[in-house]
Every structure is written in structure tokens, then in C-alpha cells.
Image (cartoon, rainbow, N blue to C red):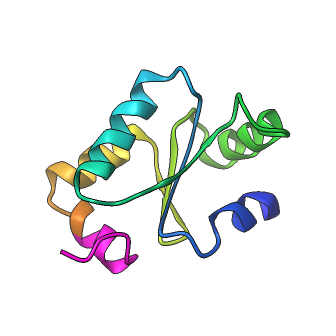
Amino acid sequence: MDRINKLVADKPVVLFSKSNCCISHTVLSLISSFGANPRVYDLDEIPNGKEIEAALVENRRSSLPAVFIGQELVGGSDEVMSLHVKGKLVPLLKKAKAIWV
């Protein structure tokens, strides 16, 4: 988790995904639609991607995508969509200073 913490430090929104994952693309599109510019790590395209994925899965007990907002693990697609439906995603993005309006 130390490596993951370093990757999410000082970034308002971070998405760990795989380049060919349509669910990750959907989550990225949703978050970007509010004006946020998430940092995306496609784990199938970076060194040590498999190790990072293993650490994320171990801590979450689920698969990708893994979304961090304000350096906190929010969860995957289900959690992000649930936050959106409940009207809590935008306030969370604002609190993390990922968006201003």
C-alpha cells in the first residue's frame, strides 16, 4: 500500500484501471463530466502494474477500477455510481478540490 499511497499523494482524483476496461472508461467519463481531471494509472501499461493491482484487490476484496478521491479509497464502479445517484459525488470532488463549481 505504500506505493499506492505515493501514487495518490497530492492528486485530487486517481483512477487505477486497465486500458481495455469499459467499466473503468465509464467511471472516468462520469468523473470527467464534472470537470475533474483524474490521474489514471492503466495497470496493464505500467511497470509493477500487476503488483499494484494485487495490493488493491487484497485491500478491497474486489477488482478494478479503484477510485481514490482526496487520497481516500472510495471504491470501484458500484461505489462511485452509488455516490453519484445519492448526490454525494460532486460534493466529494469539490471537497478534494478536483472541481470548483
**Which quadrant is home to the C terminus?**
bottom left
2 horizontally vs 7: left or right: right
83 horizontally vs 41: left or right: left
72 horizontally vs 85: left or right: right
Q: 26 and 74: which one is in front?
A: 26
User: Quarter of the image holding residue 100?
Assistant: bottom left
Query: Which residue corresponds to the image point at 65% horizontal and 72% vertical from the top-left?
Result: 9
Q: x, y (%) of residue 20?
A: 53, 20
Query: Which residue corresponds to the image point at 27% horizontal and 59% vertical from the top-left?
Result: 35
Q: Residue 62 in magenta?
A: no
Asked if residue 21 is positioned above or below residue 93 in the image, the reply reads above
12 horizontally vs 46: left or right: left
**Which quadrant is home to the N terminus?**
bottom right
Query: Which residue corresponds to the image point at 47% horizontal and 50% vertical from the top-left?
Result: 75
- All told, the count of numbered labels is 0
- The residue stretch that appears in magenta: 91-101
